[in-house]
Image (cartoon, grey):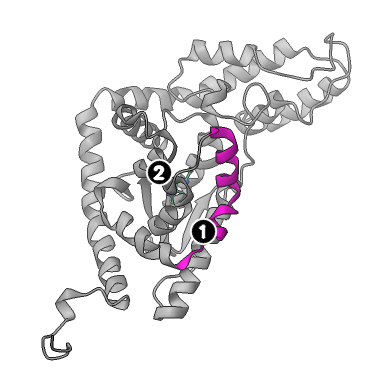
Amino acid sequence: MEKIGRILTGHRPTGPRHIGHLAGTLENWVQLQDSYECFFLIADLHVLTTDYEHPGRIPGNILEVLADWLAVGIDPGRSRIVLQSAIPQHAELAIALGMLVTVARLSRVPTYKEQVQALHLKPSLGLLNYPVLQSADILLYRADAVPVGEDQLPHLELSREIARRFNQLYGETFPEPQGLLSPTPRLPGTDNRSMHTSYGNTIALRDSAEETTRKIMGMYTDPTRLHASDPGHVEGNPVFDYHNVFNPNKEEVAEFKERYIKGKIGDVELKRRLAQVLNEHLAPIRQRREALIARPNQLIDIIQAGTQSARPVAEATMEIVKSKLGLNLAAMSYEGQPQP
Ligand code: TRP
């Protein structure tokens, strides 16, 4: 099929993926492979912006993330899976693009401000530079579109600003990358806060069926409801958010909601059914994942091959960028240079 453009997106390898990644992000990426040429980046350099004290975790987490991606349907036969740190042009382009952004602009990026508060650390230059490195990831492959969650939109806005600035100063070079928001709204965690591994409120793709059921049965629901016969609230109730996404029987979900509002169904019944549909949805993913993670060498080969095939694209862009910036040894001539 004719591709309508190029996509670059990625994850930091921070650990196994969870159902929030699955519903919000990964299932969308899998679909996009049909219509776009896709580059999926494992952004290992970005992990160090916050986790530089634990480098030992990175290699294992790269394999976890990759196994999850493949299990869900990211297809290395059609898409390129790229390891950021293995292509030096990511860092090289980030250095160049950094000249076009002010420190004041970067200090206002919301994720940066939040991280600085959360970390209780003096922010590093690397953390401030995070969205510049991300812009380099995107522009290096001259991507047309970037599927991301809402939290990443400020980073994408910066990438667009940098692309415009570069084009204005040095001539048309980069497409202005468009954000593609996922059609599925973000799933809350099992405790109804935002889903985050560090909150312990996720269901990981590698969790067993028993583990998944246990987590579902312990989920937060409507706290105002003390008895199954009390009228309940559907809005802001994560049990229903999950049913909306994972229960393929939409009539059943509509009926559950009606009964819940009237106090005619208990939370236990709702959760039992949720655990069942979620486990049915996850079973084939788990099975593929288990087979994949058991063969780490095969996973490493897939990263190698994807990275190798992305390399010429990265090199070509960086050559153009360097010559536009006056950084081009090959184009220098003795004749053209002033004599010492
Ligand atoms: N910042 C992204 C995240 O945390 C990961 C990322 C790194 C990324 N480089 C990227 C996403 C380029 C999209 C495009 O999820």
Determine whether the beta carbon of the residue marked 2 sits less than 8 angstroms from the nearest atom of ligand 1.
yes
Is residue 63 found left or right of 100 in the rendered image?
left
Residue positioned most to the front: 340
- Between residue 175 and residue 74, name the one nearer to us: 175
- Between residue 210 and residue 157, name the one nearer to us: 157
Inspect the image, locate mark 2, and give the three-letter code of the amino acid beneath it.
His
Residue at image coords 50%, 72%: 164
The quadrant where residue 260 appears: top right
Q: Is residue 249 visible?
A: no
Inspect the image, locate mark 1, and give the three-letter code of the amino acid beneath it.
Val
Instruction: Say what secondary structure mark 1 lies in.
Output: helix
Q: Is residue 108 visible?
A: yes
Q: Which mark is residue 46?
A: 2
Segment colored magenta: 100-120
- Between residue 128 and residue 232, name the one nearer to us: 128
Local crowd at mark 1 within 10 Å, few (<14), some, or many (≥20)?
few
| Residue located beneath label 1 in the image | 103
Residue at image coords 58%, 14%: 215
Q: Which mark is residue 171?
A: none
Residue 285 drawn at (x, y percent)? 42, 28
